[in-house]
Image: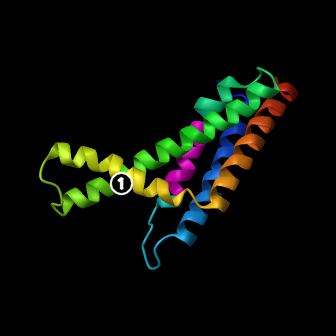
């Protein structure tokens, strides 16, 4: 069921995904083609905000902050997983793996490599402040538009 809190949560995580994706591209390898990286992360942000954060609104201010942190953590997890899976398939098409289990392990290895890029201070700051603000804004939307 569409609610204002789901919409606000989805928009907040979409904006966070857009900002962080831009920071990752700026800090990443020069000359690398990122393709649909930003768009995929924005879609994941929308889905995580709508499904995870939006339905948990209305439980108080402390729960709102925890809700924002949970939503951003889910966004980071799914972003690393989806981008790692995409990169694994690209490498698999170039016959880089000896078998299917090696390819499945590569998803997590690639995800960890991508996760290391998130350890830049400006990205961590953006994720943290964005999580708190998105949780609070989602709670405000729930209380205002029931």
Q: Main secondary structure of the magenta part?
A: helix
Q: Which residue is mark 1?
A: 110
Left or right placement of residue 107 versus residue 143 in this view: left
Disc 1 crowd rating (10 Å Cα; few below 14, some 14-19, many 20+) is some
Q: Position of residue 83 (x, y in %)?
A: 41, 53
Q: Is residue 96 above or below residue 32?
A: above
**Residue 122 shows up from this direction:** yes
Along the line of sight, which residue is nearer the eye, 64 or 145? 64
Q: Quadrant of residue 61?
A: top right
| Farthest residue, direction top | 59
Q: Quadrant of the N terminus?
A: top right
| Farthest residue, direction right | 144
How many marks on residues? 1
Q: Is residue 54 above or below residue 133?
A: above
Q: Is residue 95 above or below residue 133?
A: below
Identify the residue at horizontal 25%, vertical 60% (top origin).
91
Along the line of sight, which residue is nearer the eye, 101 or 42? 101
Residues drawn in magenta:
39-48
Q: Position of residue 80 (x, y in %)?
A: 45, 49
What kind of colouring is applied to the model shown?
A: rainbow
**Residue 49 shows up from this direction:** no
Identify the residue at horizontal 61%, vertical 42% (top origin).
72
Q: Is residue 6 above or below residue 86?
A: above
Identify the residue at horizontal 12%, vertical 53% (top origin).
98
| Farthest residue, direction left | 98
Q: Quick one: SS at disc 1?
A: helix
Residue 40 forms part of the magenta stretch? yes
| Farthest residue, direction bottom | 31
Identify the residue at horizontal 63%, vertical 58% (top origin).
123
Q: Quadrant of the C terminus?
A: top right
């Amino acid at each position: 069921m569409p609610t204002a809190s789901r919409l606000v949560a989805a928009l907040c995580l979409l904006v966070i995904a857009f900002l962080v994706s831009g920071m990752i591209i700026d800090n990443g390898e020069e000359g690398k083609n990122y393709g649909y990286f930003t768009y995929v992360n924005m879609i994941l942000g929308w889905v995580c905000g709508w499904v995870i954060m939006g339905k948990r609104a209305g439980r108080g201010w402390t729960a709102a902050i925890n809700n924002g942190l949970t939503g951003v953590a889910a966004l980071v997890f799914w972003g690393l997983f989806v981008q790692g899976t995409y990169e694994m398939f690209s490498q698999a098409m170039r016959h880089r793996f000896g078998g299917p289990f090696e390819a499945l392990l590569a998803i997590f290895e690639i995800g960890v490599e991508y996760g290391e890029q998130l350890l830049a201070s400006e990205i961590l700051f953006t994720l943290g402040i964005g999580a708190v603000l998105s949780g609070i804004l989602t709670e405000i939307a729930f209380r205002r538009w029931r």
